[in-house]
Amino acid sequence: MTATNATTTSPELYYTLPISQRSKSLTWTRTLLATAAAIVFATACLTINATQIGFLLPLRLLPFQWARQIYTDCIRFTKRAFGCLLILMCQWFAPTSLVISFEREGKGRFTPEQIERIVRKDQDGRVVSLDLPSKFVLIANHQVYADWWYAWCFTYFIGANGVHDSVFITLKKSLQWLPVLGWAMRFYNFIFLARSWVSDRVQLSTHLSALGKAAEQEDSPLVFFLYPEGTVVSKDTRPISKKFADKTGIDDMTNVLLPRSTGLHYSLRSLGPRIPDLKLLDITTVYPGIPPMGYGQSYYTLRSIFLHGIPPPTIHMHLRMFDVATNVPIGDLSKTNAAVNPRSSSAVEVEIPEKEKASFDVWLRELWHEKDMSMTKWFNGASFGEPSFEIPLRLRNKTDMCNGLGFFLPTIVGYVCSRIGK
Ligand SMILES: *[C@@H]1O[C@H](CO)[C@@H](O)[C@H](O)[C@H]1NC(C)=O
């Protein structure tokens, strides 16, 4: 019997213990830090939301095209600020690094030349950014609720300026009325779904089509996050995946849940025709500390990471990339009218022939199977493959730090004045 618990494990290795076995009492420094973390996060969120309501909402109500444009730019700015805040919270209260690697053999692989081109380093050889395309759908396995936090942090390092100001996610409709956070998410134009992909498919498709069209017209980045497993791996969801596998006669997965292809399929069919060079970026994320077959939430929660100060020491992200138009079987979209947003369930984007549905489903399951196997290999001590690149989660400069803290009002006011003066 190996007796691992809080009394025999040194604090640096606490992340390897399930949260339930860690010491419950916080040192006074930790209590102070936790309080500071909560205050910084809450204050910055409040500032962002107050700016949106007090300053930007009135702009939106003005019936002029220029006001609309300024509104859109400023909302993007508040999203950038939130992205910076997510990194700043890591930098100050839960330091960690991303370890990025690229698939070299399987689906969605990169060539050595591509990797060479993508990874940008400074004179000292430190990775400063990843020159990846700026319009993509990001899919990943889902183990902990903090997954989206770190995925958003990852977007900060894409391109010289980051694409963290162009992130879109879907959320449960009930969350839109959550004070501050929910309201801010509505300003961010996130997609709220009432029940499921199937019941909300037209709304999802209309919304995404509009986002895609705008991104293409303005040539601005667009990052849409989607977790095909729908939920985190847990003692409740594992058996559901197993049951579904048994019922349909397919193999269940080991480290991940069986992916659901429907939502992703609608999304790609809506965005694809409007963004000709849309990419699909697949990330396999693993966190040291979570044992094979373990449940991530028993090791990492937002509370344990940011308040108790026990982040994963590194976060491994293994990338695969696909060109949606040529490498992903999303079906025949030749009848789509990209200029018009789908408005009914008979639109090509949402009315998918059974055969096309089935082939996309198989494609995604195979991708997930590869992902599952690479995770098993990782657990057995192999890396995701060389080369890998470590990127500490830190902001690049003081401006970003001010933005993250919510000290951005002067910048926004300056911007608006300069626009109005023209
Ligand atoms: C700070 O870094 C961001 C990218 O994260 C960049 O867009 C910005 O121009 C930089 N600001 C200064 C003052 O260097």
Image (cartoon, rainbow, N blue to C red):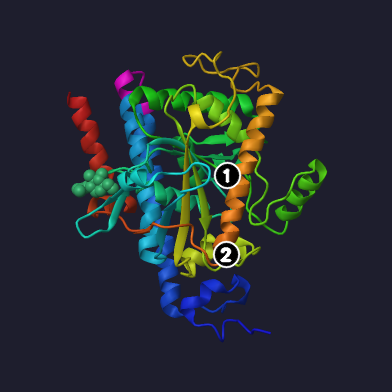
Badge 2 amino acid: Phe
Residue 216, numbered label: none
Q: Can residue 61 be seen? A: no
The CB of the residue at mark 2 lies under 8 Å from ligand 1: no
Where's the N terminus, which quadrant?
Answer: bottom right
Up/down of 39 relative to 159, above or below? below
Q: Is residue 22 magenta?
A: no
Residue at 46% from the left image edge and 64% from the top image edge: 306
Instruction: Name the amino acid type tagged 1.
Output: Tyr
Residue position for label 1: 227
Say if the magenta span includes residue 64: yes
Label tally: 2
Q: Secondary structure at mark 2?
A: helix
Where's the C terminus, which quadrant?
top left
Predominant secondary structure, magenta span? helix
Quarter of the image where one finds residue 335: top right
- Dividing the picture into quarters, in which one does residue 290 lie? bottom right
| Percent of width and height locating residue 348 | 60, 18
> The magenta stretch spans which residues?
60-68
Q: Is 297 situated above or below 201?
A: below
Q: Secondary structure at mark 1?
A: loop
Could you tell me if residue 335 is visible in this image? yes
Residue 354 in the image: x percent, y percent? 71, 24
Residue at 46% x, 22% y is 274
Q: Which residue is mark 2?
A: 379
* Image spot of residue 121 (x, y percent): 26, 53
| Residue at the spot 61% in from the left edge and 34% down from the top edge | 263
Give the crowd class for mark 2: few <14, some 14-19, many >=20 residues within 10 Å: some
Q: x, y (%) of residue 362? A: 66, 37
